Image (cartoon, rainbow, N blue to C red):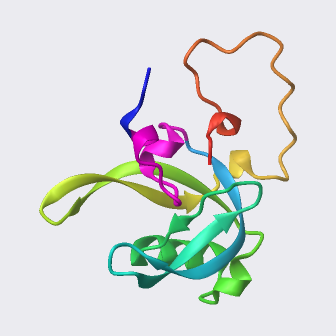
Amino acid sequence: MPNINDAFPSNYLKASDIQGATPIVTIDHVAFEAVGRERLMKAVVYFKGKDKGVVLNKTNATKIAQIAGSQQTEDWTGTRIMLYATETEFGGETVECIRIKPVPANRQASAPAPPPVTEPEPSGMVTDDDIPF
């Protein structure tokens, strides 16, 4: 079935792109790009193995700096974070947004990998690998 977001693709990751999942991503780099109608320079964080980045606002940039332990964006490379979709107030309206949090201890890279799933996943279940960004 057609999706309105397919009609208006974005160069950047949107809350609807993560489809209710909480993907864990590794920061590749941060670029400063002209964004939006007014072409304002904003920080955009890009992830290893993904095409789209997240345009950072102060909330998300501060959270990454806290997780990475540095205010310097070049120090963020290799930092693993979890993305999730939620809502916020903007211009008097409730809008979807992406937020960032630390990777839970039970999902850290040092934990042993779970055994592969041998039975098919239920229809409609979305995994991190299914998220197209």
Instruction: Classify 51 as above or below 114.
Output: below
**Disc count in the image?**
0
Give the residue drawn at x 85%, y 53%: 110
Instruction: Classify 115 as above or below 64.
Output: above
Instruction: Look at the image and give the residue range highlighted in magenta.
Output: 5-21
Give the residue drawn at x 67%, y 56%: 51
Q: Nearer the viewer, residue 126 or 69?
A: 126
The furthest residue to the front: 7
The furthest residue to the left: 92
Going by the image, does 80 lie left or right of 110? left
Measured as percent of width and height from the top left, residue 62 is found at 49, 78
Going by the image, does 94 lie left or right of 66? left
Measured as percent of width and height from the top left, residue 87 is found at 31, 51
Quarter of the picture holding the N terminus: top left
Q: Is 1 contained in the magenta span?
A: no
Give the residue drawn at x 69%, y 52%: 105
Instruction: Classify 94 as above or below 42.
Output: above
The furthest residue to the bottom: 72
Measured as percent of width and height from the top left, residue 127 is found at 65, 32
Measured as percent of width and height from the top left, residue 36 is found at 38, 72
Instruction: Classify 58 as above or below 124.
Output: below
Give the residue drawn at x 42%, y 74%: 57
Going by the image, does 42 lie left or right of 111? left
Q: Say which quarter of the image contains residue 130.
A: top right
